[in-house]
Image (cartoon, helix red, strand yellow):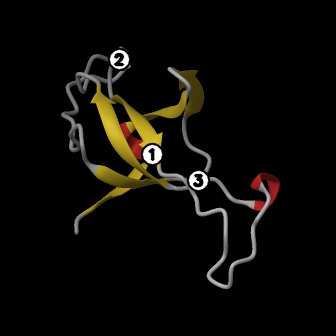
Amino acid sequence: MKLKPLFDRVVILPEQKENTTSSGIILPQTSQEAPQIGKIVAVGDGESLELDRTGMKVNVGDRVLYNKYAGSEIKLDNKTYIIMRQIDIVGVIYE
């Protein structure tokens, strides 16, 4: 993927949801909610549209939790990515 987000935006690769329940029932794609956890694959420079330097609090490779309806979905190289502002990220997940 060759995409560089601008300003305070990040590109996230959402994690895939499980297609089956713990009891083995297969769920159709339409009944599943979109994931809210993903991995950051690209980070902008950290400026806002007002040209204030906000600084980026996340890095490439971070696993993050983000708001449910945040960002714009795009498809590149047969993968679906989400581009969103840093403020739509709720937190970084550490293991």
Question: Which residue is disc 1 drawn over?
Answer: 88
Q: Position of residue 20 (x, y in %)?
A: 67, 69
| Among the two numbered marks 2 and 3 on one chain, the one whose residue lies closer to the N terminus | 2
Question: Which residue is disc 3 drawn over?
Answer: 68
Q: Are discs 3 and 1 less than 8 Å apart at CB?
A: no
Alpha carbons under labels 2 and 3: distance apart = 22 Å
- Looking at the rendered image, the quarter that the C terminus falls into is bottom left
Dot 3 alpha-carbon crowd within 10 angstroms: few under 14, some 14 to 19, many 20 or more: few
Is 79 situated above or below 65? above
Mark 2 element type: loop
Dot 2 alpha-carbon crowd within 10 angstroms: few under 14, some 14 to 19, many 20 or more: some
Alpha carbons under labels 2 and 1: distance apart = 15 Å
Disc 3 marks a residue whose amino acid type is Lys
Question: Which residue is disc 2 drawn over?
Answer: 6
Disc 1 marks a residue whose amino acid type is Asp
Using residue 45 as the reference point, say whether residue 19 is left or right of it. Answer: right
Q: Residue at x 52, y 20 (%)?
A: 76
